[in-house]
Image: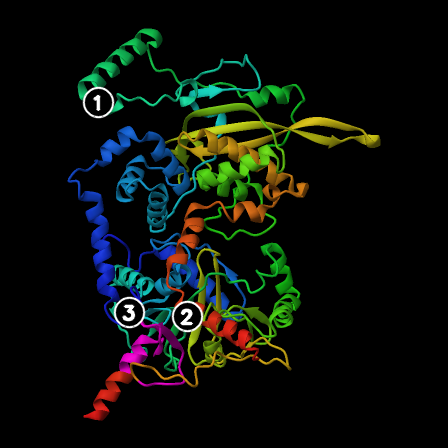
Amino acid sequence: MHDKYNFAFFDEGSKKEIRRTILKAVAIPGYQVPFASREMPVARGWGTGGLQITLVCIGQDDILKVIDQGSDESVNAVSIKKFIKATTGIKETIDTEEATIIQSRHRIPEEKLREDQILVLQVPTPEPLRNFEPSEARTKELHANQDYTGAWLMLFEQIMKYGNISTGADHTVRVNDRYIAVPSPIPKFDNPKMDNSQCLILLGAGREKKIHAIPPYTKVKSIDFEDMPFKVEDFSDKVCHECGSSGVFMDEIINRDGSTIYKCNDTSFCLKQKERGRLNER
Amino acid sequence: MAYVAVKGGQYAIEESIRRIKYERLKDKRFVSVKDIQAGMRLMIDQVMSEASLYSKELAAAAIKQGEGSLEEAVFLLRAYRSTLPRKYYSIIVESDTMRIERRISAAFKDIPGGQMLGTNFDYKHRLFDLNIENETLEDIEKYVKEFEDNIEMMEGTDEYLQFPKVADYLRQQGLLAEFPINDEAPKDVTKEQLSFPTVRSERLQILTRGMTQGVNTLAYASLRGYGTVHPTVAELRVGAFPIYIADPVAPEDEEEQYYIGEIKVTEVESLIPVMVQKDEGKKEINFAIGYGIALGQNETKAISMSILDQTLENKDSGFPTSDEEFVLYHIDSVEATGFISHLKLPHYVTFQAKLNDVRKIKRGEN
């Protein structure tokens, strides 16, 4: 495959075009920049936006990590990693600290990311106002006018109906006090990691043909109300069954006997902690 | 936790991939790409049309790889298309230069040049042929020889058939509005993101690449009751267009154009009655043209496209088939099937986050 296709799949013209989109996205934090999203050998909705960003940013010296919902070995992660490897031949890793580019679906790794790393997030629906307004033409106007009533109205309705915010994952953020944006469907637990992040975060929506970015050291605030402040999922009383960590995002695992245990969702972090535990015991 | 275990997921995936090939080969028989090309003409046409890549060979190979799944074949070709540098746009084709194989009009019985039936299932009863299983090469050769001898007797040589268009006749009668020729370069939706309101070239491009059944469904909805566009097919043509590109050094020089091959298409011009407001509150009925075109022989799709072209021109009908975002965002095969199939991916984190909220609400916390 490697010799029949160009390095990183695309022809060089396409790469340049997508890189220009990324530069624009970095220059206007949180703004969704339209781009001519290419059809990929991976299905639309399976990370083609993230994949296109990774392919145009990657160089021969990069070290790649791909995770899907926290796992390096999940279907989507394996498939994307295999594809990038086949078309570039670059080195891959599961170690968050070793990677220079991390493509992720729906999680930000537990280990803190640095300035020399890029985090690429896969985005299904890049428009934070889409549930409020189905028309793209109108949401574009709302952004232009900074008319974000709809975003808060959605929160308000949830509070009125359920007595609480029920956004689940993908809780809308305001970037650099200007555009509201989706953080991609990461759990609320990961939203604070975006604020003033040292690493560049690029978000790609292939099917919807948009790229937005959170440049390093940018203010990112999860939207909320003064009397109903934003809160992350609480796992403070849970301990990982595998490695004993706490204070991280947990997967809830149901045993055959119906009992529940918790495990770190970030599997490579979990393996590392386990390894460290083993070393300490010795 | 079968497909996202901490370790071992990768192994399970490799095995599943090996299995796909086994499923295709386990009966120890195979269809060659040439066989697909010979016997699956209309399937190839549908795949080329939705993939927007005109190559019968590649379409046949994609059908083979996708085990006959059209959405899979289209997907393969679209992805391959992304790797090809695109250096030229062809010179604009005047559609009356088509070398016609089939041409019918539902509007007029006698059209200049006459109706020409070509090939279509329309004139045949759909009786399932219980003998088709027993076809032999000998039968085939005999049938083909007889047919070809007969043609030579009737027609003699291949002539390049070109006919005037039915719509031009109506235009001469003043029943169709005259428009100046618009040779503005079309906006290419594969190069530039769609923005609203769209221009017609963008709409036509998305419709012609659209999922065949999706285009048909929306057009049928409009025809049946949601928008009630009832067109009359002025003309449906199936035939080939020669395609030229300009000399990059002398783009204006008509002598220096390069012929790069021909494409077979289905072209439809539908007549749709529209009301025209005249002076002093008077109204008049006029006809507007709905335009449909699709690579290969894709007749239902081309007619459906001509209906949707017209429903999208008339944006204020209040029906979803006139809402350009509703129609244009949802009829692409790769986008629709991709997003729906992504629901099979693990959603453990997103679901956990939702679960967390739901439990909190149930406990009445905030």
The local secondary structure at tag 3 comes to: loop
Distance from disc 1 to disc 3, alpha carbons, whole Å, reads: 51 Å
Furthest residue in direction left, as rendered: B28
Res B134 label: 1
- Residue pictured at 44% horizontal, 50% vertical: B335
Please tell me which of labels 1 and 3 falls first in the chain.
3
Q: Are marks 3 and 2 in contact (CB under 8 Å)?
A: no
> Residue A127 colored magenta?
no
Few, some or many C-alpha atoms within 10 Å of disc 2 (few <14, some 14-19, many ≥20)?
A: many
Q: Name the residue beneath numbered marker 2.
A: B349
Furthest residue in direction right, as rendered: B280
Q: Name the residue beneath numbered marker 3.
A: B5
Residue A113: x and y in percent read 38, 80
- Dot 2: chain letter: B
Distance from disc 3 to disc 2, alpha carbons, whole Å, reads: 14 Å
Res A218 label: none
**Amino acid at the residue labelled 3:** Ala
Q: Is residue B14 left or right of residue B301?
A: left
The local secondary structure at tag 1 comes to: helix
Residue B343: x and y in percent read 41, 57
Of residue A151 and residue B363, the one placed in the foreground of this image is: B363
Indicate the quadrant where residue A176 lies: bottom right
Residue A38: x and y in percent read 41, 53
Q: Is residue A43 above or below residue A165?
A: above
Few, some or many C-alpha atoms within 10 Å of disc 3 (few <14, some 14-19, many ≥20)?
A: some
Indicate the quadrant where residue B233 lies: top right
**Amino acid at the residue labelled 2:** Val
Furthest residue in direction top, as rendered: B153
